[in-house]
Structures are given as structure tokens and as C-alpha cells.
Amino acid sequence: MYLRLSAIEQFLIDSGYDAKLQLKDENFPSDIIFIMIGQDHTGRDLTLQLYLTTEQVTQDKGGVVSYSFLNFVTPFPYECTEARFGDLARLCSLINKTALFPGFKLSETDKCAVFHYVRFEFGAEINNCALDFLVATIVQLVHIFAESIENVTSGANTFQEVVSEANSITKKELSDL
């Protein structure tokens, strides 16, 4: 499939996703696809946003090569206080160490946790299976970790409490084997 947002939008719709291409305007600095990916544990809507960035690099021999970056972004709908940043940063780091696509991070300007994964694309096409796999995996990652991220963000749990709970679950699952 061609690496164009209109083609990606149609592929996502054909794959069963609720996707909508928003063209650049005064509210959006670039074209972006919004994908509704369900709700979090409290019923708030979550979206996965896709947008393309392109860089042109001049080579030593004078030619210009164009590189594209497909960005996958999910902002979490809860604000983090500065007092919680340390625990939330540690949690994001721990999750990223084990996640297939590490992308959990803090946005200090927006004061929230964000999932942001960037896929490098060389050329004008993207593999349909790869895109489907990426989107499905990112949606799963967001849903798996959203509640823990919110609990640390809100102060309901500390980083250490989340780690202890995860260790307990892992031990139980291993003993059930």
C-alpha cells in the first residue's frame, strides 16, 4: 500500500477500525488519522493518532533521499502532577523494557502520559500486514497498561505497588503452569 494517509485510512476502515482522516487546518498542523480504539477502564474514549513526517537528507554525492516516519500517538486522558512524575517515569521506563513496541513516555508540557511510537519507512510503500500488526499491538499495549498508568498518575498506587502486584500475578501464573 502506498504510504499516503488516505490509503492508510481506507485500509484501516477495511480492517474494521473506526478511522477518520482529519486534513490540516487551523486546528491541526498536519494531516492526521484518528482511530477510535475503545474505552479505558472508566469508559473514557481512547484514540490512536497516526501522522506522517518526512525528512529529506542531502547525500555526500549531492543526491537527496527522502525518509518517512509514521507516528503512532495515544495521549492518555488524565493529568499528572509534578509530584507523581518520578513514579510515572519509572513505570513508563519499566513498561518500555518489556513492550514489543516501546513508546510510553511523559509529556511534561501537557502533564500527561503518552504512547508515541515512530516507524521508519524508506520508500513509498508500507506492508499491509505490518501496519495491521502495528496497530493491533499498540492498541493492546495501550489497553493493558492504561489502568496502571492512571493509578500511578493519580496517586492511587506507587510505582513500587504496581511492581509488587505484577510480581504477584506473575508468580501465580507461573505456579499454575
Image (tube, helix red, strand yellow):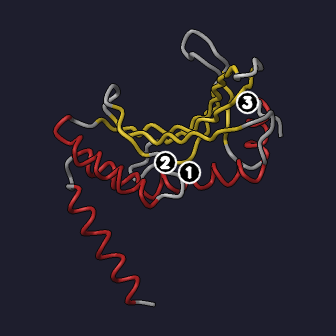
Q: Secondary structure at mark 2?
A: strand
Asked whether 38 or 95 is in front, the reply is 95
Q: Which residue is mark 2?
A: 39
Q: Which residue is mark 1?
A: 138
Label 2 and label 1: CA atoms lie apart by: 14 Å
Q: Is residue 44 above or below residue 5?
A: below
Q: Residue at x 52, y 37 (%)?
A: 73
Q: Does label 3 or label 2 sit earlier along the sequence? A: 3
Position of 128 with respect to 42 (left or right) is: right
Q: Secondary structure at mark 3?
A: helix
- The percent coordinates of residue 101 (x first, y second) are 53, 52
Residue that extends furthest to the right in the rendered view of this protein? 1
Q: Residues within 10 Å of mark 2 (few under 14, many from 20)?
A: few
Label 3 and label 2: CA atoms lie apart by: 24 Å
Q: Is residue 95 above or below residue 70?
A: below
Q: Residues within 10 Å of mark 3 (few under 14, many from 20)?
A: many
Asked whether 65 or 47 is in front, the reply is 65
Q: Which mark is residue 5?
A: 3
Residue 53 occupies quadrant: top right
